[in-house]
Amino acid sequence: MTEQAKWIEQSLAGDHQAFNRLVMAYEESVMRFLRARCVNEAMAEDVFQETLINAYRYLQNYQAQYAFSTWLFSIANNAMKRHYRQFTTLDQTQLDETVAASECQQLQRDNIWRLVRQVLSTEQGNLLWLYYFEGYNGREIAKIMERSIPWVKINLLRAKQKMKQALGAVDVVA
């Protein structure tokens, strides 16, 4: 039995320290994932908190055949989707302020992920992040994003092609 499996078993038995060890093992990677996709740090933290609450609440539903990280990223991805759906309930002034704050942050972040967000859909950006930065394979990404493996492979290829074209256009301009 792996150390992680012991922590899960102990957490299910009510050991809060074991759950804290699980959280600490994945906190950095999940927060990195959320920061790259949320409009600001506060939203990323809110989504992370919701992720932890749901992971603790539904830990008994975790299936050991999958990596714990895959399950946790699925929860984070779903929590992020819920937060973005809440934007549709904001009035237009609040929405404009949120978008303006997001645009300011994007201008301050001088990296490839700004271009990813401009060129690709949210799902394609998430695919690239999970594949390149988190190191997940197609099967794990399909589980996290609740999509089929062929969908993941096709959209990963399309995302790579779009980025190649966008990066080529940047080189021509520069």
Image (cartoon, rainbow, N blue to C red):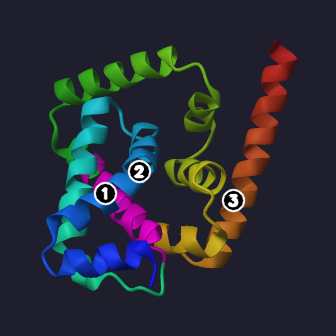
Q: What residue type is labelled 3?
A: Leu
Which of the two marks, 3 or 1, is nearer to us in this view? 1
Q: Is residue 91 magenta?
A: no
Badge 2 element: helix
Q: Nearer the viewer, residue 17 or 90?
A: 17
Q: Position of residue 148 (x, y in %)?
A: 57, 78
Q: Residue at x 24, y 58 (%)?
A: 20
What residue sits right under mark 1 in the picture? 23
Report crowding for label 2: few under 14, some 14 to 19, many 20 or more residues within 10 A (C-alpha). Answer: many
> Nearest the camera: 68 or 152?
68
Residue 83 magenta-highlighted: yes
Amino acid carrying mark 1 in the image: Val
Q: For the residues carrying marks 2 and 1, which lies nearer the camera in this image? A: 1
* Residue 56: x %, y % from top left: 20, 68
**Who is closer to the viewer here, 170 or 60?**
60
Q: Which stretch appears magenta?
A: 67-84
Q: Mark 2 points at which residue?
A: 30
In the depicted structure, whether residue 22 falls above or below residue 47? below
Mark 3–mark 1 Cα distance, whole angstroms, equals 28 Å
**Mark 2 and mark 3: span between their CA atoms?**
20 Å
Q: Are marks 2 and 1 in contact (CB under 8 Å)?
A: no
Which amino acid type is shown beneath numbered disc 2? Val
Query: To which quarter of the image does residue 78 belong?
Result: bottom left
Asked whether the residues under the numbered discs 2 and 3 touch, taking CB atoms below 8 Å apart as contact, a structural biologist would say no
Compared with 164, 107 (above or below) is above
Picture layout, residue 65 above or below residue 169: below
